Amino acid sequence: MRLHRSILKNASSRAMPRDKALPKELRLKKWNIIKGDKVMVMTGKDRGQSGTVTEVVRKTNRLYIRGLNLASKNVPKSKDSPTGKLQKEMPIHVSNVALVDPSTNQPTKIRLGTFVDPDTGARETRRYAQGTGTYIPKIVDLSYQKNWKDGAFDTDPDVVNKVSFHTIPGTPPFPDDVMREIVNRYKKLY
């Protein structure tokens, strides 16, 4: 939703933080760092410290690292913050971090290589550490599944596993009127 300039001028940046998105030509085309990767900060106040990427913001070429680049924010005193100050993670530009090689725990550049699965023949692009050639796997984040709960509209597993269609050789998979519609999809149906 876009708001008029006069409304935005009066809005507090504390109440409504504004991330300024970069123009499309300045955004990175390829991202070699994803959520869940272990990275090391190469510049800034947290130089030499490593942590896990918690969020990637592609619109601004920045990422958040758990426990690094902290800033204090003044908030009203409450049970949760008796001192009135909160520690908040701030974004770090992607050029200021490097992936950590899993075999040496040192920062490394990466190269992309094509891997062909010998069993299935499926191709996939993998990340390898530049110096040692160690494979750096992409970690799949499934933490959101912990919050899943079965609801009233969810289908029972027994119903999902039940076979509801039995094929008969020589008969089309759909009724005749549906088959005519598929075959003659650019013609009028009578």
Image (cartoon, helix red, strand yellow):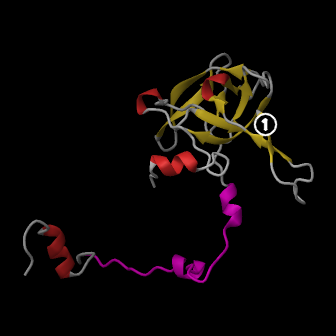
- Give me the residue at 74% from left, 40% from top: 89
Using the image as rendered, state which of residue 94 and residue 173 is in the foreground. Answer: 94
Secondary structure of the residue carrying numbered label 1: strand
Which of the 4 quarters of the picture holds residue 183? bottom left
Q: Which residues are magenta?
A: 143-169
Q: Is residue 148 magenta?
A: yes
Residue wearing tag 1: 71
Is 84 left or right of 96, judged from the image as shown?
right
Image quarter (top left, top right, bottom left or bottom right) of the C terminus? bottom left
Q: Position of residue 113 (x, y in %)?
A: 52, 26
Is 155 left or right of 26, judged from the image as shown?
right
Q: Amino acid at mark 1?
A: Ala
Residue 184 in the image: above or below residue 99: below
Q: Is residue 68 magenta?
A: no
Q: Position of residue 91 (x, y in %)?
A: 67, 35
Using the image as rendered, state which of residue 120 and residue 52 is in the foreground. Answer: 52
